[in-house]
Amino acid sequence: MTAPSGHSADAWGERLPRSLGLWSAVAVLVGITIGSGIFRVPATVAAHLQDPGPVMLAWVLGGLITLFGALTIAELAGALPRSGGIFAYVLEGFGPLPAFLVGWAELAVVRAAALGGISTIFAEYLGYFIAMTQSQVRYCAATTIVAVALLNYIGVGRAAAVMNFATLLKFIAVAALGLLAFSAGNGSAENFTPLWSSTVGASLLGTALIPILWTYDGWSNLSFVGGEVRDPQRSLPLALIIGTVAVIVIYMLINLAFIYLLPLPQMAGAQFIASTAAANIPLLGGFGASIVAAIVMISTFSSLNGSIMTGPRVFFAMAERGLFFRSIARVSPRFHTPSHAILLTAALGVIYVLQNDFAQLADKFILGAWPSYALAVAAVFVLRRKRPDLQRPYRTWGYPVVPALFLLASVGMIANALWTDPANTAITFGIILVGVPVYFIWQARAARRIAVTE
């Protein structure tokens, strides 16, 4: 597959201005990752695992898997700092068909499900201040997607400024909530006993890991804007590692705080777990639930902003490489953003949020995204062999063990999903595999167009 006319194969993905510095890149990663999940998923995990020991083990495992992925992807981000991120790495490592399937998964499942899930939580917590029916929650979520898409349409610099402010605010707020739980909360250390009362099977642990990995997801999205980061060979690996470690630390703190404030059976039944936990911090007075609802809204808005900032770059990169409609590679002459890719992303998010609930969106996202992550990590092995002379400012720490463990965890999680929920998993994978005939149809169409032109 050749580069689009006017762009060399080595220069593709370089038409967008490099306007993001190191700390803006860290803010993008943290801002996307700490979104809606941490304010809802701990209740789901508590219901699955029921004891503090297995619950914390699952969160530690999720953090380690995420860190291993970030440590590995950082090598590719430094060596191939292009828009499209994982799509670009898979294209270099495995060629156009696997890369197209990565982009197709992003198009058909991943990005729309992510936007739908995040905006749904934003709208649900807005319900603390404005009474809404369930259908109104979905319309509110759809409206929020459109508003944030317009913010990104008018410039990545403006969107990044909002991201930096919102990320700093929510990081401080979430950390303060965790620390207040131990210093001023009506909690009990007895909530951690018994630590482990029964045997937890690997399958149950794997099932709990699916929503946990939803909360950790976002570490890879930074690579999508690799073509817009300044000094990318240094900044991208650093931002991936710094941001991922920061997220792991804050997630462990907040989960310990939730368990301290709420016995696990109460956690398991709490839909709005953060607000329920805050009610046990007297220092917050009667405003605890409202304060937490506001924190969640800031957090999810920031995450939604980051997701719309990064996701469209995959479609943009596909179009630049001739694997999608060329019009999607349009860069706005006024705002210097991938305008058509942003509008497409927003439209898909609106469609998904109007047709799926949160649980359906979260499962679709994780099962759609992780095969792509596994391919990108596998590309590290392939490119070490195929392109040994490729400049690598950062080389994966712990290679080859760290990427191998990530691949093992990815395969295990996907296999467990097929075993425990074969119907929904098969539907998600079926949607992705539809991309195979779509790819060949697209190639045939492109060949006919070239023949007619000649």
Image (spheres, rainbow, N blue to C red):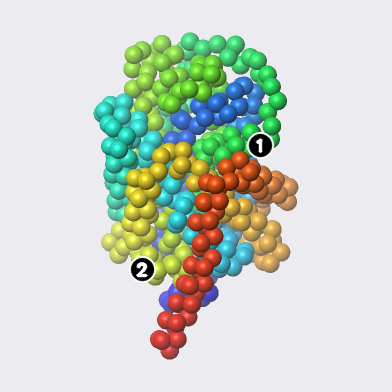
Amino acid under disc 1 = Ser
**Is 105 located above or below residue 358 in the figure?**
below
**Is 106 located above or below residue 24 in the figure?**
below
The residue drawn where x is 62% and y is 21% is 51
Label 1 to label 2: alpha-carbon separation: 45 Å
Residue 394 shows in the view = no
Give coordinates of residue 131: x percent, y percent. 26, 28
Give coordinates of residue 239: x percent, y percent. 53, 45
As rendered, which of 74 and 429 lies closer to the eye?
A: 429
**Is 382 located above or below residue 2 in the figure?**
above
Question: Which residue, as the protein is rendered here, is positioned at the far bottom?
Answer: 454
The residue drawn where x is 58% and y is 29% is 48
Q: Earlier in the sequence, mark 1 or mark 2?
A: 1
Which residue bears the numbered disc 1?
A: 203
Which residue bears the numbered disc 2?
A: 327
Q: Residue 140: which quarter of the image?
A: top left
Amino acid under disc 2 = Ser
Q: Quadrant of the C terminus?
A: bottom left
As rendered, which of 344 and 64 lies closer to the eye?
A: 344
